[in-house]
Image (cartoon, rainbow, N blue to C red):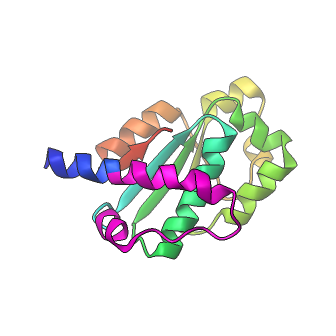
Amino acid sequence: MMMKRTFQFFSLVVVMLFSTAVMSQDAPKMIDKAVVKTLNKTPNLGFGVSEERPLRSAFMMYEQMKQSGVKFDNYEIVVWSMVVKNIKEDKDLFEFISKRMDDGITVSVCSVAMDKLGVKKEDLPKGIQVVDNAYVRIFELQALGYNFLIP
């Protein structure tokens, strides 16, 4: 069981590494069918991000996996740190997130970061949920069986 989880995690890491190259392209590169088959064994995926670049990568990875046929039940991005304020103040980032929100993705933002940075829920794109603490949320998702990545 541990070996299976390790393999799934490393498969996810490999896919994440490919996302950096994908960000520079308009259309995401399709994921190899063998990797898709492996990823389909993992129904719950999560990303923890505290900077803009990994946040954008997490959204791009979602699109790439979805277009490549990866089937998952849940895909959650947990956000904390200064990027929370960037979402509020950077119109381009705000718009980037707003355009990519759909029913298959959950974005959770840390209320501790929001409080410290002076960000209110109404400052964030529609559909974002606020969680009490990003780290506690990550532990909760891991306890629920999510494969979780913090790049």
The residue that appears at 67% across and 64% down in the rendered structure is 100
State the image quarter where residue 114 is shown.
top right
Start and end of the magenta stretch? 11-39
Q: Residue at x 70, y 30 (%)?
A: 82
Position of residue 118 relative to residue 101, above or below, is above
Inspect the magenta stretch and tell me whether residue 2 lies in it: no
Q: Looking at the picture, tell me which residue is in the foreground, 10 or 59.
A: 10
Provide the major secondary structure of the magenta segment.
helix
Q: Can the viewer see residue 63? A: yes
Residue 38 is inside the magenta segment: yes
Of all residues, the one furthest to the left in this rendering is: 1
Picture quarter containing residue 123?
Answer: top right
x then y, percent, for residue 132: 54, 35
Task: Describe residue 56's horizontal placement relative to residue 124 as left or right.
Answer: left
Q: Is residue 82 above or below residue 6?
A: above
Instruction: Tell me residue 49's x, y (percent).
Output: 57, 39
* Image spot of residue 126 (x, y percent): 72, 58
Quarter-wise, where is residue 62 in the image? bottom right
